[in-house]
């Protein structure tokens, strides 16, 4: 751990005293150079999402005041005691939402809701999610079910019962996946979301009958398969996060916390994330 100066928030920013910071695959990919599409200038502080308490408000911010409990995306810098965040990617934390869940929810909920909107999923359609037990997969599956869709999700055997509890029909990774999907959905699926980035796009494209309604949030080789790679910006982020946070506080959306780590254990948290098969989210609590 190192000490860095505390920065005052600029225009449109809030400063958050961090209670929990979500760990995401992008964190270790940036550290290891496996995300070449994003430039990183070292030394860099990872962490793109947090929950915490607003302790300073920048010029032009009227939605928040010092002392407000919030959750949101930060871009970078979340693995810290304090972090700056754009006010338009931050939402009020419902009183009943635990800090650890709130810290792992912003990126998963923002990405999942945005992806479902891009897929145009309708009631009665079937969605296939690769890596359905992870953060984005977990939230996307539940939001799709709430919209009236059917959901099939790939996961390791250890996570199958978890997916069933959420209402997602699990299917095992590995050799023979195409046949297992076909056994569940003989006519194929209507849309597919790759939240894994581990080479599953050909299978998803085949199951969906083409790349038109297949999206990935994790595979930089998307273009080779005719698939669109999506990333979410700030537009609408606070609203998407707020909806998911409200559902989670009401017990209508579940995000498992697979493990919590102290700030000095961030390296271990990233090692676990890199191994894959995480159920829900890993969270750092400074």
Image: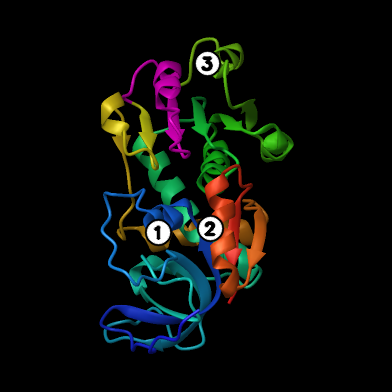
Q: Quadrant of the C terminus?
A: bottom right
Q: Nearer the viewer, residue 42 or 201?
A: 42
Q: Nearer the viewer, residue 213 or 27?
A: 27
The answer to whether marks 1 and 3 mark residues whose Cβ atoms lie closer than 8 Å is no
Q: Specify the quadrant of the image occupied by residue 11.
A: bottom left
Q: Nearer the viewer, residue 47 or 243?
A: 47
User: What residue is rendered at 68% in x and 55% in y?
Assistant: 251
Height in image: 211 above or below 109? Answer: above
The answer to whether marks 3 and 2 mark residues whose Cβ atoms lie closer than 8 Å is no
Question: Which residue is under mark 1?
Answer: 31
Q: Please state the extent of the stretch shown in magenta in the rendering.
A: 190-212
Foreground tag (3 vs 2): 2
Q: CA distance from mark 1 to mark 3?
A: 33 Å
Where disc 2 sits, the SS reads helix
Residue 69 visible in the snapshot? no
Q: CA distance from mark 3 to mark 2?
A: 31 Å
Image position, residue 61 (x, y; %): 32, 81
Where disc 3 sits, the SS reads helix
Mark closer to the chain start, 1 or 2:
1
Image position, residue 76 (x, y; %): 37, 67
User: Which numbered disc covers residue 270?
Assistant: 2
User: What residue is rendered at 33% in x and 52% in y?
Assistant: 232
Q: Is residue 263 left or right of residue 217?
A: right
Image position, residue 199 (x, y; %): 43, 30
User: Which numbered disc covers residue 178?
Assistant: 3
Height in image: 6 above or below 279? Answer: below
The answer to whether marks 1 and 2 mark residues whose Cβ atoms lie closer than 8 Å is yes
Q: Specify the quadrant of the image occupied by residue 75.
A: bottom left
Q: Is residue 90 left or right of residue 282?
A: left
């Amino acid at each position: 751990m190192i000490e860095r100066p505390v920065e005052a928030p600029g225009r449109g920013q809030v400063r958050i005293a961090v209670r929990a910071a979500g760990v995401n695959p992008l964190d270790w990919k940036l550290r290891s150079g496996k995300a070449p599409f994003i430039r990183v200038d070292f030394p860099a502080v990872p962490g793109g999402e947090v929950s915490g308490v607003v302790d300073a408000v920048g010029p032009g911010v009227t939605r928040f005041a010092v002392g407000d409990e919030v959750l949101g995306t930060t871009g970078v810098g979340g693995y810290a005691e304090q972090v700056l965040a754009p006010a338009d990617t931050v939402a009020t934390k419902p009183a009943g939402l635990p800090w650890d869940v709130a810290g792992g929810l912003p990126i998963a909920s923002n990405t999942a809701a945005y992806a479902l909107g891009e897929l145009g999923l309708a009631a009665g359609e079937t969605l296939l999610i690769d890596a359905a037990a992870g953060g984005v997969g977990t939230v996307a599956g539940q939001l799709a079910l709430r919209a009236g869709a059917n959901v099939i999700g790939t996961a390791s055997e250890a996570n199958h019962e978890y997916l069933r509890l959420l209402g997602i029909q699990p299917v095992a990774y590995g050799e023979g996946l195409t046949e297992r999907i076909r056994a569940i959905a003989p006519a194929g699926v209507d849309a597919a979301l790759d939240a894994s980035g581990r080479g599953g796009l050909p299978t998803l494209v085949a199951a969906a009958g083409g790349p038109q309604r297949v999206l990935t949030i994790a595979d930089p080789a998307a273009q080779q398969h005719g698939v669109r790679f999506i990333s979410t910006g700030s537009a609408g982020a606070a609203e998407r996060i707020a909806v998911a946070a409200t559902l989670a506080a009401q017990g209508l959306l579940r995000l498992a916390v697979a493990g919590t780590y102290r700030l000095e254990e961030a390296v271990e948290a990233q090692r676990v994330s890199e191994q894959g098969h995480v159920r829900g989210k890993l969270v750092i609590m400074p």
